[in-house]
């Protein structure tokens, strides 16, 4: 059996076990979801559902990636093993920022959570560290793949670094906004990460294949508890982590622009919020019934399952297209 499949299956199993252990603890601590009164009325029944479940994904990744690190070192694959750690640190770093925000809101009952300025500073600090590692530590250069044209362009270093940081911050925010319906963010993210993992394997980046497989397994294991009706939500802990995974893998592969295609759903979710806010400030009226976009379709009569299925089918089609244009 292919090593990547073995990693995925191990990660999935660990994630399910972690979920079985963690969810009752979250219930005991009364770490429950807080729903908006002005949101879809169907969401009010979710009040109190355990959240901060992203720790299931974090715990799984730490266990599986650490296990891989030890194993790869034992079979004289130390170079690959060492390349796994920066990606793990990036994603866990984002997860920790999300965890602090969730913890303040849900455990300390501070409705404001982590101050936006502190939150952005934390995300920015981690993003800068990872980009500097890619450019100066890994020395992958500033070449960036242009989809469809199937060619690379070399960006000036003074442009590439802020661009790469923006990609990370934008992606984490987009995945965070996509997290609003049972199973939506986790399923869409799984498809995107699977696509990036396949590209990594095809282009002989074993560390991307190993790392991506561990995240896919962890996310699918979490999805078993996150499907409608969800038994747990990922919170910012999970959504920021998955955003870090997606942006980190895309930059590692030198294909951040591919996210415009394969991550179009999160991109549209972000654009819908920006349009809604800008239009409301200017006219006092709304373009959408509610933003992000998935809530608009909910208020238009779509069930949560229908939204998730349609958004996933669109993402799947775009991911297949993405594989054809790289």
Image: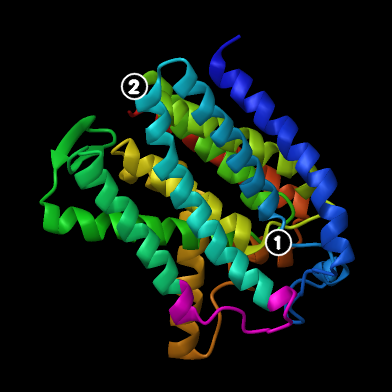
Q: Is residue 119 left or right of residue 256?
A: right
Q: Residue at x 50, y 67 (%)?
A: 272
Q: Residue at x 34, y 26 (%)?
A: 79
Which quadrant of the rendered structure holds the C terminus?
top left
> In which quadrant of the rendered view does residue 27 lie?
bottom right
> In which quadrant of the rendered view does residue 104 lie?
bottom right
Q: In this figure, which residue is indicated by the disc labeled 2?
A: 203
- Secondary structure, mark 1, is loop
Q: Residue at x 89, y 64 (%)?
A: 28
Q: Residue at x 34, y 52 (%)?
A: 130
Above or below, 138 against 306 in this view is above
Q: Is residue 279 magenta?
A: no
Image coordinates of residue 258 in percent, x first then y, are 36, 41
Residue range in magenta is: 105-119
Marks 1/2: CA distance?
35 Å
Residue 79 in sight in this render = yes
Task: Name the foreground residue: 91 vs 39.
Answer: 91
For mark 2, does the 10 Å Cα neighbourhood hold few (<14), some (14 to 19), or many (20 or more) residues?
Answer: few
For mark 1, does the 10 Å Cα neighbourhood hold few (<14), some (14 to 19), or many (20 or more) residues?
Answer: many
The residue furthest top is 1
Image coordinates of residue 215 in percent, x first then y, are 57, 38
Which quadrant of the rendered structure holds the N terminus?
top right
* Label 1 close to label 2 by CB (< 8 Å): no
Task: Name the foreground residue: 19 vs 33.
Answer: 19
> In which quadrant of the rendered view does residue 196 lie?
top left
Label at residue 123: none
Q: Is residue 314 left or right of residue 75?
A: right
The residue furthest left is 156
Task: Name the foreground residue: 242 vs 211.
Answer: 211
Q: In this figure, which residue is indicated by the disc labeled 1?
A: 52
Q: Is residue 114 magenta?
A: yes
């Amino acid at each position: 059996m292919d090593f990547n499949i073995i990693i995925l299956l191990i990660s999935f199993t660990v994630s399910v076990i972690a979920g079985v252990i963690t969810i009752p603890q979250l219930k005991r601590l009364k770490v429950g979801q807080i729903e908006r009164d002005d949101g879809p009325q169907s969401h009010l029944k979710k009040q109190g559902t355990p959240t901060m479940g992203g720790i299931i994904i974090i715990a799984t990744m730490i266990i599986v990636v650490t296990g891989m690190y030890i194993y790869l070192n034992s079979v004289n694959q130390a170079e690959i093993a060492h390349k796994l750690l920066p990606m793990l640190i990036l994603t866990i770093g984002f997860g920790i920022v999300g965890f602090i925000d969730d913890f303040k809101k849900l455990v300390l009952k501070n409705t404001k959570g982590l101050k936006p300025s502190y939150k952005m500073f934390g995300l920015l600090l981690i993003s800068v560290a990872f980009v500097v590692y890619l450019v100066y530590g890994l020395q992958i250069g500033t070449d960036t793949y242009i989809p469809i044209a199937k060619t690379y362009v070399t960006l000036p270093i003074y442009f590439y670094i802020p661009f790469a940081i923006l990609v990370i911050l934008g992606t984490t925010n987009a995945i965070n906004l996509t997290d609003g319906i049972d199973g939506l963010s986790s399923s869409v993210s799984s498809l995107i990460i699977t696509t990036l993992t396949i590209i990594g394997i095809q282009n002989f980046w074993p560390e991307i294949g190993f790392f991506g497989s561990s995240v896919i397994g962890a996310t699918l294991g979490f999805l078993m508890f996150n499907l409608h009706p969800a038994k747990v939500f990922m919170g910012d802990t999970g959504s920021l982590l998955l955003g870090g995974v997606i942006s980190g893998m895309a930059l590692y592969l030198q294909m951040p622009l591919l996210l415009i295609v394969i991550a179009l759903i999160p991109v549209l979710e972000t654009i819908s919020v920006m349009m809604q806010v800008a239009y409301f400030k200017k006219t006092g009226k709304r373009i959408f019934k509610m933003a992000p976009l998935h809530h608009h379709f909910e208020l238009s009569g779509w069930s949560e399952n229908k939204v998730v299925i349609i958004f996933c089918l669109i993402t799947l089609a775009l991911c297949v297209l993405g594989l054809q244009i790289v």
